[in-house]
Amino acid sequence: MMRVNSAFQDCLYEMLLVVESVFVRKLSQGKDPPEELKLKTRECTQQLLCFLQERFRKLSSRMETLLVNSVLSIPKNVLLPDDESHRKYPQSQAQLLKLETSIVDLQRSYQAEMCARQALLTELEEQKQTQEQLEEVLRWIEELRLLWKREGMGNAQDSFQHMMETVNKLQSIMGKIRKKSRSLDDV
């Protein structure tokens, strides 16, 4: 059952990523989708994933119970040759509970790892998008630097320094104008 659960969840993750990309593409009508649409679609996909996982968990527990009770059960009056050692050396109830607890802990750990995997895949996708944006900004800066050189403005650092000095001068002039307008308003 754990392998069936694992296979289903892997298929579900892949399918939801495809469905999410189709929705984003359809909603953006072929244009570059806005970040808000991507984020909202990702939230909806995660909500759908949680809903489907809960439903499948309930269904798989019912299937497991049905399989154990109907298909995989051996009548009490039948002793298989492999079970002869169990009849001679029965395990205590405490050991059985310990094993069951260990199984539950392993299932929780597996589910946590699957959720972490999904979160890492999501983070990787976001990092790819951020990397593309960063490369675009770097291309823009390089084009701007080349334009400054071609136009004879010197390098970008000198231009920025000159621009900052100009902004500071403008701010001081604006402050003087405000003071004079206040003094005129008071009169």
Image: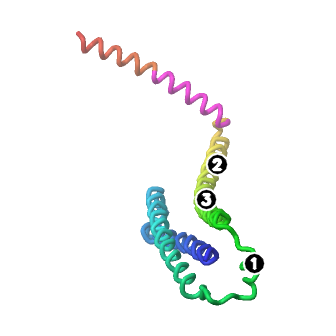
Secondary structure at numbered mark 3: helix
Q: CA distance from mark 2 to mark 1?
A: 75 Å
Q: CA distance from mark 1 to mark 3?
A: 44 Å
- Determine if the magenta segment contains residue 166: yes
Q: Point out residue 126 in the picture as x, y percentages from the top left corner.
A: 58, 57
Per the image, the residue denoted by label 1 is 88
| Cβ–Cβ under 8 Å for marks 2 and 1 | no
Secondary structure at numbered mark 2: helix
Q: CA distance from mark 3 to mark 2?
A: 32 Å
Residue 145, quarter of the rendered image:
top right
Residue 105 visible to an observer of this rendering: yes
Say what amino acid the circle numbered 3 marks. Answer: Ala
Residue 121 visible to an observer of this rendering: no
Other-residue count near label 1 (Cα within 10 Å), few / some / many at <14 / 14–19 / ≥20: few
Q: Point out residue 39 in the picture as x, y percentages from the top left corner.
A: 47, 58
Dot placed on the residue nearer the N-terminal end, 2 or 1:
1
